[in-house]
Image: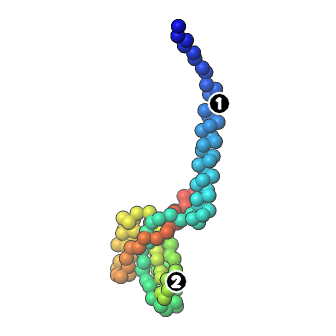
Amino acid sequence: MSHISFSQENPNSSAIQTSLKLRALQEKKAEYHRRTNGETDGYRVKIHFGSDRSKAEEIQSKFSAKYSEIPTYQEYQQPNFVIMIGDYKTKLEAFEAMKRIKEDYPYAFIVKSKVRPLKIN
């Protein structure tokens, strides 16, 4: 003798489980961003490095005046002050930016870096 049984799953149960999983993922992502300062692996273009801080600041200022839409970053990598530009997810994006500025910065080159993703409002 065989028995066949049917069960009815509560449709709200599935929605609640999905909601809880989604919330857990959102919390994990928020924690990851807190730990990494919202930065991710990517590329920047290095336009200057040298031991003279005022020269580095001058180059950064001139770059920002001409290319105001591209973010600039100054870092100290002993013994040099480094000026890098952009926040590019792919090397191709960084290459396109480098081509655009190459006339003004012929010695610019692409470097791997931690980058800040673009914020979309």
The percent position of residue 83, horizontal first and vertical second, equals 47, 80
Instruction: Answer yes or no: is residue 55 visible.
Output: no
Q: Looking at the picture, does residue 3 appear above or below residue 119?
A: above
Label 2, secondary structure: give it: strand
Relative depth, front residue between 4 and 65: 4
The percent position of residue 36, horizontal first and vertical second, equals 57, 65
Label 1, secondary structure: give it: helix
Relative depth, front residue between 14 and 105: 14
Q: Looking at the picture, does residue 92 appear above or below residue 13?
A: below
Label 2 Cα crowd, 10 Å radius (few <14 / some 14-19 / many 20+)? few
Q: Residue furthest front?
A: 1
Q: Residue at x 43, y 83 (%)?
A: 48
The percent position of residue 79, horizontal first and vertical second, equals 48, 88
Label 1 Cα crowd, 10 Å radius (few <14 / some 14-19 / many 20+)? few
User: Given the image, on which type of amino acid does mark 1 rest?
Assistant: Asn
Q: Residue at x 50, y 76 (%)?
A: 72
Quadrant into which the C terminus falls = bottom right
Q: Residue 85 vs residue 96: left or right?
A: right
Relative depth, front residue between 82 and 86: 82
Q: Residue at x 45, y 88 (%)?
A: 50
Q: Looking at the picture, does residue 87 appear above or below residue 55?
A: above
Instruction: Answer yes or no: is residue 23 visible.
Output: yes
CA gap between label 2 and label 1 equals 56 Å
Identify the residue under disc 1: 12
